[in-house]
Image (cartoon, rainbow, N blue to C red):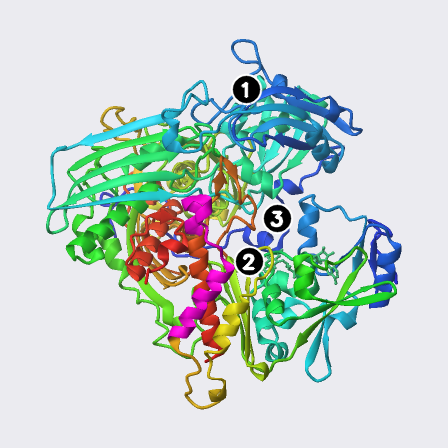
Amino acid sequence: MEHGGNLVNRTIMLPASVDEAVEALAVTPGAVPVAGATDLMEAVNAGRLRPAALIGLGRITELRGWRYEDGGTAVLGAGLTHARMDRPDFAALIPALADAARTAGPPQVRNVGTLGGNIATAAPTGDTLPVLAALEATATLARAGAVREVPISHLLTGLDPLRPGELLTWVRVPLLHAPQVFLKSTGRSGPARAAASVALVLDPARRGVRCAVGAVAPVPLRPLEAESWVAGCIDWDARGAEGAVLIDPAALAAFGEYVAGACVPEGGAHGEGAGSAAARLRRTVAVLARRALGRALK
Amino acid sequence: MTSATELPAPAPADPGTGTTGLGTSPLRTDALPKALGIYPYAADLWAEGLLWGAVLRSPHPHARIVSVDTAPALAIPGVHAVVTAADLPPGPDGTPDGAPAGPVTADRPVLAAGVVRHHGEPVAAVAADHPDTARLAAAAILVEYEPLEPVTDPEAAFHAAPLHPDGNLLRHLPLRTGDPDAVGAVVVEGLYQVGRQDPAPIGAEAGLAVPRPDGGVELHLSSTDPHGDRDRTAACLGIDPDRVRLVVTGVPGATTDREDLSFQVTLALLALRTGRPVKMTLTRAESFQAHTTRHPALLRYRHHADAEGRLVKVEAQILLDGGAYADVSAEALAAAVAFSVGPYTCPNVFVDAWAVRTNNPPAGRMRGEGALQTCFAYESQLDQLAKQLGIDPVEIRRRNAMTTGDPLPTGQAVTCPAPVRALLDALDTTPLPALPLDDPEADWLLPGGPGGAGDPAAVRRGIGYAVGMVHMLGAEGEDEVATATVRVSGDHATVICAAVDSGQGFATLARQIVQSVLGVSEVYIAPVDSDQSAAGPSARGRHTWVSGGAVERAALMVRHQMLQPIAADFGMSVELLTINDGKITSYDGVLGMPVSEALEGRELWATAQCRPHPTEPLDPETGQGDAFVSIAFCAMRAVVDVDIELGAVRVVDVTVAQEVGRALNPRQIEDRIEGAVAQGVGLALLENLRTEGGVPVNASLTGYRLPTALDTPDIRIAALLEERDVVAPFGAKAVSAVPAVVAPAAVAAAVRAATGLPVGRLPIPPEDAIVPV
Ligand SMILES: Cc1cc2nc3c(=O)[nH]c(=O)nc-3n(C[C@H](O)[C@H](O)[C@H](O)COP(=O)(O)OP(=O)(O)OC[C@H]3O[C@@H](n4cnc5c(N)ncnc54)[C@H](O)[C@@H]3O)c2cc1C
């Protein structure tokens, strides 16, 4: 392990493996892991965070790629950058995650910002989060001498949070070999945080549709009833047939409304202003969900 | 060959045929260093033994200051001084009043005394040996506030208890002309709202103050008004202006005044107090709190027109939110009123306009202040009229367009070129951008951006037109004057002029002027400081006119000195000699002498002033008067794509036709137009410093959305009309403000065309562009 930086000697560590990193976290009080620093430095600059020590993850090459497991699962390194996930080989594998990575900030940020950082920050507008929720991904959390596997949704909701000294190492994602879509509404053409986003994946093997709505609540929301209802509206057997219509357009629109109704509460109780803001958000989510399913079934 | 009697006086500043001088497009000398990141700004300055300044700001938009205890800050090791309003000269009654100052009315304290009137108002400042220590110490100052109810609704300001001894009404300006009872065949009404645009300069406020042995202070700042700032700083400190020297550093972006007075005076005060150089740089969050913004506005309009769409009567009520202090609200209001009808003729105009004080962030100067807000309103009204009457939006504008000699509603005749119709006609000579249909193979950028949620089936294209106007130079009797010195020594010339090149390109222009007049190619532009003669602020497109005019005059005087002995030698008058491409030639071709030869061993210099014709204040009862020196006009066509389900708008193309008098540097003009259009598009769609209860909620570059390259359309120049303005030096008009004035209106018109919706708010919220099903 190297000790970097003469400026703040011994406070920046650059481990070269997961084991070294976990060890460093265990023995350094107050140490904080840092990957692309696109969220961390913002907190430091704003004075919200003054880490006693930093453990840079950039040299852990194993976490910057992915591998396959049991034929049906991709195991993604926490150090995968958004830019890397946007590349065609990755996009062919997990299209919705690539879509999300493509919109997660300007190029400078996507070149260094990572999947692990996005999950650990757990911002409501974290773009990979609804995709991971829809994919029902799990995370591997490592600490000295112990490794555990936690559903991403449990991590995000605080049901089973990241504990001090724990490193997020891997993200397990099922490979579905079917269309998936991530749509984000920002109200502008340049890079921006989501006002609302929808991730939608098809799981033809289980004849399922899974959907998660981002940015409208502290964590991504799953409209489970709408998912199972719409799965029943899809003509799964017609998939692949030339010119087949897989779903009635009216069902598409109804799905949008269903998702929006499930994920954006009526704002009426908070007075008219909040009510109309909520109505607008509902409309946006309905459009996104309708378009997402429409694209997935095209 | 021309005979002597027929020969006109030498055209000042011959256009020249060469590659230097007026009419060419030399690259700015600061372009490369800026692109390479080696151009020095105030934030890069350093002085031996310097201390760091930090400011404590009010967390309340309105509160009484019960007590200030600086002891905890002073107790921190490394802290050298803590200053409050009590350290500034006292007010007339002998108690601290924070040494109020301001560009027009001295109502804004340097440091709050007894009361804070806006969120982020400076209350105290610290000098310490490390920037972190200074910030920590500032945070350690104990201020006890008694929060007061903030007045944040400008309409409530009229009846609210006075927020300031000067009251809440910053100015009321009525305008009455014509027959109040006139009625038209059609009447359209509209309510229009403009949000709070922030100048968001690329470089935040920064400066260095160095105490002088004579008890004075030297300030190194990116000031855009060095003499005004010197005088106001000295007045606030209670010292003689001669003992304050302002040295202007590189200006990192200015579409408004820089830097705010409180920043300058506090910096100077800390240096004087500690006897050490003090440096201060604001964080981005502080920068949002420190500088002034564009005036948010509420405009109610009623247009009467005849069946052909000709304007019969315009009635308007205009309310500008001035924020906590007066700043230039009175000036902005004059522009709003005078240009309330736009570049159209209308016999009957009745306007009431108010600028009021609130506890919102102070508003000030920003490209086209006042004129921009009304342009959005009157152009929206014309779109409504066109729709109601079934007339083409361009045609209705052509029918009402003013032309040279027509009066403004203020009674002033527009004597400068006003080719409004020609500008409108020029737009359509540039073809419209392609539709996705024309080129299905291309990767179309949909509203919502790359990877966004855009769906081609929900995208509608709209084309909108707007025309607008803004005055140049100070208005309503303000004394406009600039002084410049030109010196020639050997083969090179030097310009000494205190006109700050705030990025507008004045230094490049000054060089071109001297090259044209004197034929010397090497021209050095001296850095600006307040020991030079005054040239006034970099605002309202002044410098092209007054400072450019002063440079030209000084150069012409030097030219005369240079040519006189030669003319005498040849027994002809100076008027018969011309300078072209570095060569002096006589009318008869006998003489052909390089300028360098004529100048050999000589040193010539001259100082000259330029002072345009005076103006007068608008009448406080009727709004009548000759208030402006000259007016700039511009027409625009905007093309937008709107996702009518999500309300996302992408501006595809903006085509500009502008009246420039004379294109002194065509490339620089294009750059200025592009910058202004980008800023206008930002206001049209994105930029709004939102406040809740007077507190800004998005004062960061994440929250405050500036246009990026993806948000900025293709900007094309259909025409730069060159009809000389006979009273302007070179016949040229300023170019930067008017495109910013017109762009928001043009974008709004295009969104209106795409959606069929009224579009009454800027920036256009997505919900205003969603077509209900
Ligand atoms: C201008 C800008 C625009 C942005 N736009 C978007 C956007 O549109 N959408 C979006 O989703 N995000 C956006 N972001 C946020 C940010 O870029 C992403 O969240 C990014 O994925 C964070 O990754 P990072 O590697 O930079 O994290 P860091 O900043 O390095 O870390 C963030 C947090 O995660 C922790 N952490 C990092 N890695 C691990 C790990 N392996 N195990 C445990 N803890 C870890 C750190 O300790 C820290 O607390 C933007 C940021 C900026 C600056």
B214 drawn magenta: no
Q: Position of residue B599 (x, y in %)?
A: 50, 43
Mark 1 lies on a secondary structure that is: loop
Which amino acid does the dot numbered 3 rest on?
Answer: Tyr
Q: What is the secondary structure assignment of the residue under circle 2?
A: loop
Q: Which residue is mark 2?
A: A215
Give the farthest residue toward the bottom: A241
x then y, percent, for residue B260: 53, 33
Depth order, front residue of B42/A240? A240
Residue B740 is situated, as x and y percent measured from the top left of the image, at 39, 48
Mark 2 vs mark 1, foreground winner is 2
**Whether marks 2 and 3 lie on the same chain:** no
User: Which numbered mark, 2 or 3, is in the foreground of this view?
Assistant: 2
What chain does badge 3 belong to? B
Q: On the picture, is B262 further left or further right than B388? A: right
Q: Is residue A51 left or right of residue B668?
A: right
| Quadrant placement of the N terminus of chain A | bottom right
Question: Pointers 3 and 1 in contact (CB under 8 A)?
Answer: no
Pointer 2 and pointer 3: residues touching (CB < 8 Å)?
no
Label 1: which residue? B99
Quadrant assignment for the C terminus of chain A: bottom left
The amino acid type found where label 1 is placed reads Ala
Q: In this figure, which residue is indicated by the disc labeled 3?
A: B39
Q: Between A103 and B434, which is closer to the camera in this rendering? A: A103
Residue furthest top as drawn? B93
Q: For the magenta stretch, what is the residue range?
A: A250-277
Badge 2 and badge 1 in a common chain? no
Q: Is residue B130 left or right of residue B248?
A: right
Closer to the N terminus: mark 3 or mark 1? 3
